[in-house]
Each structure stands twice: as C-alpha cells, then as structure tokens.
Image (cartoon, rainbow, N blue to C red):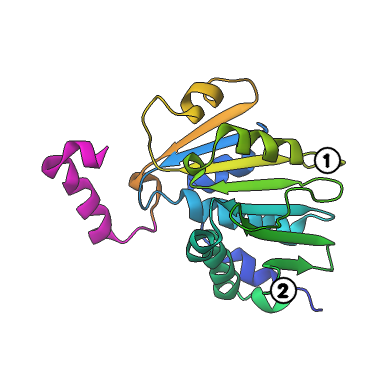
Amino acid sequence: MTQPSEEVVKRIGYTNVFARNRDSRARTLVNIGGSGSSKSHSIAQLQIEKFFTESDKQFIIVRKTMPALRRSSYALVVGLLKEYGLYDHVEHNKTDNVLHRPARNNAMWFFGLDEPSNAKSLAGGASYVWMEEADEFTFEDFLAFRLQVRRRTEKELNHIYLSLNPIDDSGWIPTKLVGQEDVEVIHSTIDDNPFAEAAYAQSLKKLYSEDENYYR
C-alpha cells in the first residue's frame, strides 16, 4: 500500500477547535458547540491525522445507535478521507464497520450501543474514543468507555472525546465531568469556524432576535 502524498495533507484547512483538541493534555475533552461550530468536523480531522501519523493505535467512534452513527460521524470520516485523497490508502471493512491502516497497525472501529456485539472490549484497550452526541449516553456508558482508554503508549497520550450541542446544567456531563481533574471543556460557536458559509452563519446569528431560547 502506497503512502499518501504530503501535499494532500498540507492543503487541508482546520479551525482553532481542531488545534485546541490536538494540543490538549487532558485525558477527557468535552466539546460543546452549536451548529456549524466545527466541533465534529475538527474531531474527525484529528482522528484522521492520528490514524495516518501514529502507530499501533485502536480508535473507537460511537453513538447510541448505529443508524445515527452512519448518518453522522461514520459518513463524516469516510467523506473526509475521500475528500483528502486518503481513502485509497486504508482498508475499509464495510461488514464490520472498521477502517484499517496496516502500514501503521491502526484500526478505527465504528459502532452503536444498539448492536448485539461491539468493540467495547478491544484486546489491549483503546487509544482514542469519540462519543458523538455524548449526552445521548448515560454516565455508566461513559465510565465503561473511559475504562477502555488504556492502551499502552510510549509518547502519545490516550484521550476520550465527547461532542455535543449546548445542554442544560442538570445532565451528567455538566454535573459529573465539567470541572473535574483531567477534563477540559472546549466551547465553540459558528464564529470559531472561518470556513462556514457566510449566509448560513448569518442565518444562525439571526436566530437571536427571532427566538433567543432556540438560539442558545
């Protein structure tokens, strides 16, 4: 399998949300942002970067249900791989919903908790877990995945990423995670995404005068 051209990677644009996730030393990163803030796009980009530059890593990308995951993170990651010219440099097992990068001994698993079998018990543990729409999960789900983030590593830190829309203060994420040691919260809005289409960004901001609660 050939290596992807470096020129492909160099022309990929990213936002400060991507940079803040990449540079964080926290084990748990909670990404809270509204529509168009680039949180999911940025985390997907970061998983792809790690998938192609690091070695001996196991990735888990999960949502509460597989149909929802197929429409969101799964489609996003595969779409970005194709957009960046990288898809032909991975092995895509569509039956098991897993991407392999044999040259780096990396695997990226996609699954929903509604499946009868899943990758929650990977041999040796996971390096990175991304829980998309994390408020759909329970705190017990989070704890189970956090226990999986234990793969042995020599230099790169293991991380668990949570992405979600702004929520009220009564859920398990704000009450049990926010403010805890080794947890970083990354807030983002449409203003953090310079690649957002101008008319779309303006329509979001217009919501403030139309329905303040919905805007929040």
Q: In which quadrant will I find the N terminus?
A: bottom right
Q: Which residue is mark 1?
A: 155
Q: Secondary structure at mark 1?
A: loop
Q: Which residues are magenta?
A: 195-216
**x then y, percent, for residue 81:** 60, 70
Q: Nearer the viewer, residue 99 or 49?
A: 99
Residue 118's x, y, as percent? 70, 56
Q: Which residue is mark 2?
A: 93
Q: Is residue 213 magenta?
A: yes
Q: Main secondary structure of the magenta part?
A: helix
Q: Position of residue 47 (x, y in %)?
A: 64, 55
Within 10 angstroms of label 2, few (less than 14), some, or many (20 or more) residues?
Answer: few
Q: Is residue 191 above or below residue 179?
A: below
* In the image: residue 30, left or right of residue 210: right
Q: Does the magenta segment cover residue 129? A: no
Question: Which of the pair 202/173 is nearer the observer?
Answer: 173
Farthest residue, direction front: 116
Q: Nearer the viewer, mark 2 or mark 1?
A: 2
The quarter in which the C terminus is drawn is: top left
Hey, what amino acid is under mark 1? Lys
Q: Residue at x 83, y 68 (%)?
A: 102
Residue at x-position 53% and y-position 67%:
75
Q: Of the residues under marks 2 and 1, which one precedes in the sequence?
A: 2
Amino acid type at image mark 2: Asn
Element carrying mark 2: strand
Task: Give the number of marks.
Answer: 2
Name the residue: 63% across, 66% down.
9
| Vertical arrangement, residue 31 with respect to residue 173, above or below | below
Q: Quadrant of residue 146?
A: top right
